[in-house]
Amino acid sequence: MTSQHPSLTSAKHSATPDWIMPGRSLIQAGMRMLGAISPSRAASVMQRLWFSAPRTMPRAADQAVLDGGESLSFRVDGREVAAWSWGEEGPTVFLLHGWGGNAGQLQAFVMPLLEAGFRVVAFDAPSHGASAASRHGGRTVTFFEFAESLKIIAAGESHVAGIIAHSGGCTAVSLALRAGWTPPASLVFIAPFVRPEASIDAFAHAIGANDRVIAAFRDRVEHWLGHPWSYLDIATMDAAHKQARLLVIHDEDDKEVPLSHAFTLVNAWPSARLMVTRGLGHRRVLRDPAVLDSALSFLAQEAPSARRGARSYLPRDSRSTLDRAYEACVSHGSAIGAR
């Protein structure tokens, strides 16, 4: 049907985060006790939990696609960021994962983009996948580091035609735009995490934080980041930052980022289009054939110079690996996890 997480960072904040579930009762008990004694200290704990990224690695089929590309390395805030590229020519399309994700989650887009004549670049954000920890150390990271990575890596590409971003990766793109980065002509946002602030209450409930802790947490984060929560809201960007063509794809059964985020964004973005899917959830949508076709068609409309039959762009020894990985994804899509 066609009509359109921190964050601060997390696409998981709209529901109870998976990584909290095993020790949820202990976290809740500790937070309730600390919140009653010292809301300020409890807010500090809540901040650490909110900004702690679960590190996931690609599954075998996803890793095979990454292995078929050229391995790259960049320095962001003095830390190594792992990246991969496919193709030596053609306009570039970036693939950007969300909070707690990795580059392999978007691997289903690689082959179609290559065969349409695009060059493809993907990377693991700081504190994610194969990349080193962010400048904050440990597992702490924000979408500002995602955005900085995107800007640095994109600076080395001669022609960026588009971006396909998932969930919190969309939030990161918006932060890059707010910082003055010039976007490509076309953006594809899949399950965009549009309003991080709207997820605070659900996250607080999941960890047992009371109202005083929540208020202190809001203030602490704004002071730490140097921006109000509204700065993380993609829909509130100035019109000058909304000049790119935008395709928003969102599944109505997404339990992590509600479909309402997509409607909010489309209503606020002049040239946005919306595609609503059903039964795919938050991550399977990244492998759905109809989603792949729609994203590719949308990007190709603005990039007529992308040459067809771009198999020659691939490193000579990578084609068979990439073909096998892609075929495995098509045959066994349901077995390929997003995390």
Image (tube, rainbow, N blue to C red):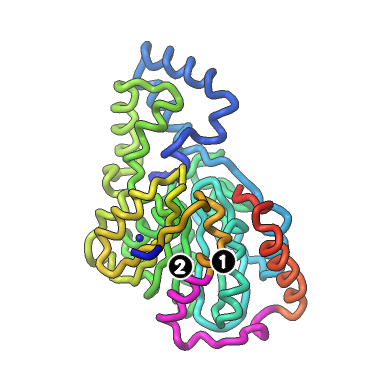
Type of the residue with mark 1: Pro
In the rendered view, does 226 fall on the left or right side of 321? left
Q: From the viewer's side, name the closer residue of 149 and 211.
A: 211
Residue 42 is inside the magenta segment: no
Name the residue rendered at 65%, 53% in the picture.
334
To which residue does mark 2 refer?
163
Where's residue 255, x and y in %?
A: 46, 42
Where's residue 6, x and y in %?
A: 42, 44
Crowding at mark 1 (Cα within 10 Å: few <14, some 14-19, many 20+): few
Residue 300 is inside the magenta segment: yes
- The answer to whether 112 is drawn above or below residue 330 in the figure is below
Give the magenta-colored segment's residue range. 293-314
- The answer to whether 186 is drawn above or below residue 135 in the figure is below
Q: From the viewer's side, name the closer residue of 30 and 130.
A: 30
Where's residue 236, x and y in %?
A: 25, 54
- The answer to whether 274 is drawn above or below residue 115 in the figure is above
Mark 1 or mark 2: name the one nearer the start of the chain: 2
To which residue does mark 1 refer?
289
Q: From the viewer's side, name the closer residue of 286 and 182.
A: 286
Assign a secondary structure to mark 2: strand
Q: From the viewer's side, name the closer residue of 263 and 164.
A: 263
Name the residue rendered at 34%, 62% in the picture.
177
Q: CA distance from mark 1 to mark 2?
A: 18 Å
Quadrant (top left, top right, bottom left, bottom right) of the N terminus:
bottom left
Where's residue 56, x and y in %?
A: 62, 46
Residue 156: which disc? none
Determine which quarter of the picture holds residue 325.
bottom right
In the rendered view, does 296 fall on the left or right side of 71? left
Assign a secondary structure to mark 1: helix
How many numbered marks, from 0 up?
A: 2
Name the residue rendered at 54%, 46% in the picture.
100
- Kindly give the residue lying farthest to the left in the view shown: 239
